[in-house]
Image (cartoon, rainbow, N blue to C red):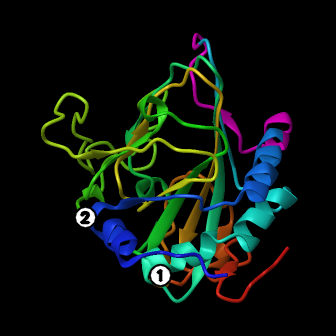
Amino acid sequence: MSFNISEADIKAYHDDGAVLIKNLLNEEEVTDLREAIDANISNPSPNSKIASSEDDPGWFLEDFCTWQENPSYRRIIFESAISEVAAKLMCSKQVRLFHDHMLVKKKGTIQRTPWHQDQPYYNIEGRQNISFWIPVDPVPIEWTIELVASSHKGQWYMPRNFLENQAKWFPEGSLSEIPDIDANPDKFRVLKWELEPGDAVAFHMLTLHSGAGTKALRRVFSVRMLGDDIIHAPRSWKTSPDFAGLSEQLPAGMPMDHKLFPLTWPVNRAK
């Protein structure tokens, strides 16, 4: 059955750069995904990293690009409604997987994810893109993802690594710094929702977003997807995530037609 996405959902995505999709995953899929995340936590990949400081009483773990080794991740990516919803929200004929991203904050984590955009960390250009932030635990409003409405329509901001606040992707001064959103609440419309397992926040890769620490375990699976107009934009630095050797296989300006980025909509059902 087709997943119902309304014209209001599509408008919200294009106007605000973010929209809540309730029950994107069904109960069986949530259980499958929860077990997949737990398996990923127990066996992190070489791409994994701890994104919280050593003195944090909790723990913030990230891992990237493990869909090829994790069959449950593949089922969620290729067999759930995610790709159909992505196509509808992006108004794209085709959808490609860009990468998966696991984010886990243990109970008591105080590390706040700083305000940032995703696309400046990447090796892509184009407007038809989307990220899904899907928790498998209940997320109260005070610990949920926060997003600045319509920020995807503006400029690129300087990407910095979260712990050292260093500019590692673009030269210092080449992009504007992110404004102090928390100190100026009247200047920014911040979107945030209380979430249940299987709900998803869908947002553009240029939408400014952030997240608080948590007083309960918060396991999240994020899927990043690409639409019709996305092209390869090789960087002279290591992107996050890094696709080593891709520049030799996929020239600059070409569509992301490569085995690392398989088609997920409308026809591919790879396992």
- Residue for badge 2: 153
- Residue for badge 1: 253
Query: In the drawing, does residue 95 fall left or right of residue 130?
Result: right
| Residue 184 visible in rendering | yes
Looking at the picture, how far across and down is residue 106, in whole percent? 65, 25
Residue depicted at 73% across the width and 55% down the height: 27
Numbered label attached to residue 91: none
Quadrant in which the C terminus is drawn: bottom right
- Figure quadrant of residue 244: bottom right
Looking at the picture, how far across and down is residue 205, in whole percent? 43, 60
Q: Nearer the viewer, residue 178 or 129?
A: 129
What segment carries the magenta color?
39-56
Query: In the drawing, does residue 236 fall left or right of residue 107?
Result: left
Counting other residues with Cα less than 10 Å from the Cα at mark 1, is it few (<14), some (14-19), or many (20 or more)? few
Q: Name, please, the residue furthest toward the left.
A: 186
Residue depicted at 73% across the width and 52% down the height: 30
As helix, strand or loop, the secondary structure at mark 1 comes to loop
